[in-house]
Image (spheres, helix red, strand yellow):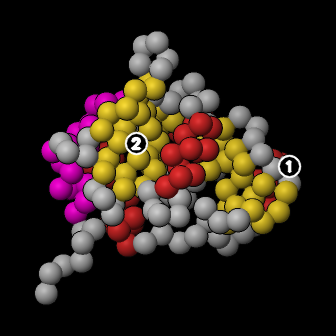
């Protein structure tokens, strides 16, 4: 997460953002330029996008990655690394999603605190959201937060297990496949 660039209304941000060559997130009137991702980040996103997409084939749900906007109420627009939605409105939109059931963020040293703190607090306001998964390619940690029947978020640390379990979509992915390609090939 970079420093805020400027202050603007949500409508002004959306009009401005659609003209920008890069991606910029919006939170409470502030606009934040997104920085480029590292190779490990790209590997994890591509691996999960493939696995989730194959798992969801033929279902009413779809996985979307990195370049898609997620709006939370009137004060936040983020670009999640991955999200899954089954919402008819989301599946008909060209630009702005509003009702994912699953959001995945791949952590980096510069975004980790923001993804765990502010973003998670904002994402929890989405009534559709059932699961939030954080993946750290450097430490090989995978943490899933799932909303239980009482509406409380419960941590499921999958770091020491064999699988990433995305319970909201009924999909399990071996951690070895989540992190496939993260380490450069041995000489």
Name the element at disc 2: strand
Question: Which residue in the structure is indicated by mark 1?
Answer: 9
Query: Which of pointers 2 and 1 lies earlier in the amino acid sequence?
Result: 1
In the image, what residue occupies the spot 13% across and 87% down?
187
Question: Which residue in the structure is indicated by mark 2?
Answer: 133
Name the element at disc 1: loop
Q: Is residue 58 magenta?
A: no
Judge left or right: residue 122 versus residue 167: right
Q: Residue 37: image x %, image y %? A: 48, 69
Of residue 10 and residue 85, the one placed in the foreground of this image is 10
* Figure quadrant of residue 140: bottom left
Judge left or right: residue 170 versus residue 99: left
Q: Residue 165: image x %, image y %? A: 27, 37
Classify 157 as above or below 148. Answer: below
Of residue 120 and residue 113, the one placed in the foreground of this image is 113
Q: Which mark is residue 145?
A: none
In the image, what residue occupies the spot 18% across and 56% down?
176
Q: Is residue 168 magenta?
A: yes
2 or 1: mark nearer the eye = 2
Quadrant occupied by the N terminus? bottom right
Q: Which residues are magenta?
A: 162-180
* Figure quadrant of residue 155: top left
In the image, what residue occupies the spot 35% across and 68% down?
40
Q: Residue 177: image x %, image y %? A: 20, 56
Q: From this viewpoint, is residue 134 visible?
A: yes
In the image, what residue occupies the spot 62% across and 38% down?
122
Q: Residue 69: image x %, image y %? A: 61, 50
For marks 2 and 1, give the CA distance: 29 Å
């Amino acid at each position: 997460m970079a420093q805020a660039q400027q202050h603007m209304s949500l409508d002004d941000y959306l009009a401005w953002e659609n003209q920008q060559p890069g991606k910029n997130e919006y939170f409470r009137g502030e606009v934040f330029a997104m920085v480029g991702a590292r190779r490990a980040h790209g590997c994890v996103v591509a691996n999960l996008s493939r696995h989730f997409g194959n798992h969801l084939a033929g279902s009413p749900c779809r996985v979307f990655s990195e370049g898609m906007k997620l709006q939370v109420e009137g004060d936040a627009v983020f670009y999640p690394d991955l999200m899954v939605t089954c919402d008819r409105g989301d599946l008909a939109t060209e630009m702005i999603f509003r009702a994912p059931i699953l959001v995945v963020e791949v952590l980096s040293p510069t975004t980790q605190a923001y993804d765990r703190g502010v973003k998670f607090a904002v994402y929890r306001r989405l009534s559709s959201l059932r699961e939030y998964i954080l993946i750290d390619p450097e430490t090989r940690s995978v943490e899933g937060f799932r909303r239980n029947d009482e509406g409380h978020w419960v941590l499921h640390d999958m770091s020491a297990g064999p699988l990433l379990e995305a319970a909201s979509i009924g999909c399990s992915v071996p951690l070895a496949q989540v992190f496939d390609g993260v380490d450069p090939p041995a000489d």
